[in-house]
Image (cartoon, grey):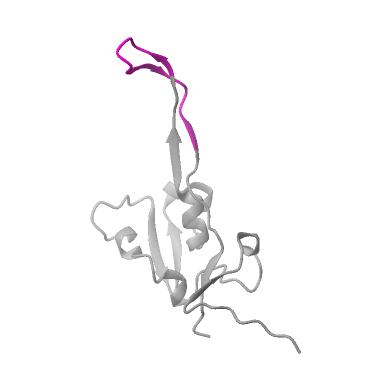
Amino acid sequence: MQFSLVPFSASVNVGPANKDKAWMDLDGISPIHHENFDWTTMYKTASGVDPNKYIEKVGDARWKRGSGWGAGQNTPMTRFKLYEEMTATTRTCTKKRSNGSCQTYSTPTTGQYEAWKGCVEARPY
């Protein structure tokens, strides 16, 4: 007989390669899936939210609503999708002035800012 003891209290790292496995909460229906996010700040009724890009709670899941999501409209908003949606724009100074400040920049490049690293919480079921 073999066994393993994993020292964790609420979450464990299953590895980012397991992101799309059937045993993962791919649609975000577990309440634990959303416990670290305040989606109410992105509901259509929240102050300052774009009426063409908002989150709607349907049952236990959250959904992307509005044309501002493009091809992602009417799909589940999960922690995985949240990481995919986080982008950053960077640019590089291509020519400096004599005082060291930047005179011209390269064309801005936008890419994914962060990625899910594989941590999951214990499920209530």
* Residue located farthest toward the left when viewing the structure as drawn: 47
- Quadrant placement of the N terminus: bottom right
In percent of width and height, residue 43 lies at 33, 61
Is residue 109 part of the magenta span, yes or no?
A: yes
In percent of width and height, residue 104 lies at 39, 16
Residue 57 sits in which quadrant? bottom left
Residue at 35 percent of width and 64 percent of height: 39
Residue at 37 percent of width and 65 percent of height: 37
Q: Is residue 117 above or below residue 29?
A: above
Q: Is residue 88 left or right of residue 2?
A: left
Residue at 65 percent of width and 60 percent of height: 17
Q: Is residue 65 visible?
A: yes
* Residue located farthest toward the right when viewing the structure as drawn: 1
Residue 13 sits in which quadrant? bottom right
Is residue 120 part of the magenta span, yes or no?
A: no
Q: Nearer the viewer, residue 108 or 102?
A: 102
How many numbered badges does the structure rendering display?
0
Q: Is residue 14 left or right of residue 1?
A: left
Q: Nearer the viewer, residue 70 or 35?
A: 35
User: Which segment is the magenta one?
Assistant: 94-110
In percent of width and height, residue 48 lies at 25, 51
